[in-house]
Image (cartoon, helix red, strand yellow):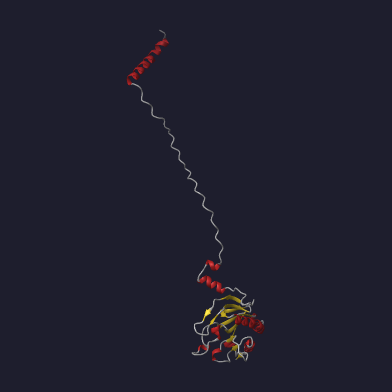
C-alpha cells in the first residue's frame, strides 16, 4: 500500500460515517423561502399635491371704499371735488335734499362749498347754487382786488354761519331766516397769506382797516340782495350777513 493511500483512509471513513448518519436521520426538512436582509424600500417623497388655483389679484379700490364709514365720509367731504354749480372757481360737492324741520326751511338741491373764487372757506358752507355763485363772483370782483397784495394777498374767508333752519336773529315768531333756505352766508374775517386776520368786529372802526372793510361791504350790495354789517343792528357787529333774497326795490344794504 502506498503512502498516499494511507493518508486518504481517514477521510474515507469520515465520508462513510456521514452517509450513515444521513440515512438514519431521514430526508432533510425543506429550506425556508429565501428572504432579503435589505429593509423594505419606502417612498420617502410625499405625493405631489394638486396645484392650487392661481390667486386673483385684488381689484384696486378707492380710499373711501377702503375705509368706509365715518372716516371715508369725512375724507370725501373735506377734499374739494369741483368745479361746482357751473363755476370753475367753486369747489365742493352736491348734497342730498335737506328737508326743513319747520315750514319755510329746507333745500331741494344743496351744495357743500369748500372754496369760492379760489379762496378756502374756514368751514364748508351749505348753500344753494345761486348763492354759491354770487359768493364766488364777489370774491373775484371785489375781495381780491380790494385787498390786493396786502399781507401777501387774501387766501381765505372766515365763515361764521351758513345753512341753519331758524328764524331771523333767532327771535320767536319771526319769519324764517334766509339761512334756513340756503341763501345766506355770514363772513366774519378775511384771512391773508402772512397770517393777518382782518376781522369785521375789530376792524370796522380801526383806522387801518375800516376803509377796506367798508369797500368790501359796499361791493357786496347789488350782487347780494341783502347785506348787513356792524351798523345795521346789534346782531351783526362781528360779521357781514350776505344773502340772495330779492326785493322789488332792489338790494337792502345796511
Q: In this view of the protein, which residue sits in the foreground, 23 or 113?
A: 113
Q: Position of residue 224 (x, y in %)?
A: 62, 86
| Location of residue 129 in the rendering, given as x and y in whole percent from the top left corner | 60, 80
Please give the name of the residue rendered at 39% of the width and 11% of the height, measured from the top-left corner. Answer: 6
Vertical position of residue 233 compared to residue 85: above or below: below
Q: Residue at x 54, y 68 (%)?
A: 64
Residue 196 seen anywhere in this rendered image of the structure: no
Q: Residue at x 58, y 79 (%)?
A: 121
Q: In this view, does 33 lie above or below 133?
A: above
Residue 80 sits in quarter? bottom right
Place of residue 107 in the rendered image (x, y in percent of width and height, measured from the top left): 55, 81
Between 127 and 31, the one lying in front of the other is 127
121 w.r.t. 19: above or below: below
Q: Is residue 109 above or below residue 215?
A: above
Specify the quadrant of the image occupied by residue 182: bottom right
| Residue 158 seen from this side | yes
Quadrant placement of the C terminus: bottom right
Amino acid at each position: 500500500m502506498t503512502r498516499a493511500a494511507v493518508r486518504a483512509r481517514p477521510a474515507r471513513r469520515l465520508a462513510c460515517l456521514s452517509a450513515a448518519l444521513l440515512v438514519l436521520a431521514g430526508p432533510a426538512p425543506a429550506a425556508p423561502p429565501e428572504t432579503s436582509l435589505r429593509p423594505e424600500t419606502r417612498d420617502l417623497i410625499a405625493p405631489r399635491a394638486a396645484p392650487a388655483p392661481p390667486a386673483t389679484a385684488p381689484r384696486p379700490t378707492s380710499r373711501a371704499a377702503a375705509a368706509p364709514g365715518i372716516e371715508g365720509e369725512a375724507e370725501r367731504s373735506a377734499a374739494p371735488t369741483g368745479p361746482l354749480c357751473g363755476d370753475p372757481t367753486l369747489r365742493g360737492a352736491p348734497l342730498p335734499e335737506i328737508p326743513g324741520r319747520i315750514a319755510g326751511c329746507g333745500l331741494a338741491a344743496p351744495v357743500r362749498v369748500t372754496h369760492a373764487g379760489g379762496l378756502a372757506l374756514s368751514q364748508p358752507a351749505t348753500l344753494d347754487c345761486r348763492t354759491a355763485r354770487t359768493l364766488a363772483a364777489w370774491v373775484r370782483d371785489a375781495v381780491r382786488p380790494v385787498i390786493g397784495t396786502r399781507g401777501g394777498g387774501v387766501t381765505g374767508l372766515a365763515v361764521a354761519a351758513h345753512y341753519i333752519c331758524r328764524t331771523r336773529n333767532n327771535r320767536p315768531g319771526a319769519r324764517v331766516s334766509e339761512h334756513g333756505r340756503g341763501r345766506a352766508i355770514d363772513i366774519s374775517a378775511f384771512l391773508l397769506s402772512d397770517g393777518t386776520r382782518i376781522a369785521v368786529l375789530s376792524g370796522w372802526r380801526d383806522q387801518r382797516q375800516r376803509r377796506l372793510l367798508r369797500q368790501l361791504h359796499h361791493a357786496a350790495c347789488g350782487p347780494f340782495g341783502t347785506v348787513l354789517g356792524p351798523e345795521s343792528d346789534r346782531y351783526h357787529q362781528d360779521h357781514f350777513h350776505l344773502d340772495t333774497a330779492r326785493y322789488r326795490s332792489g338790494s337792502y344794504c345796511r
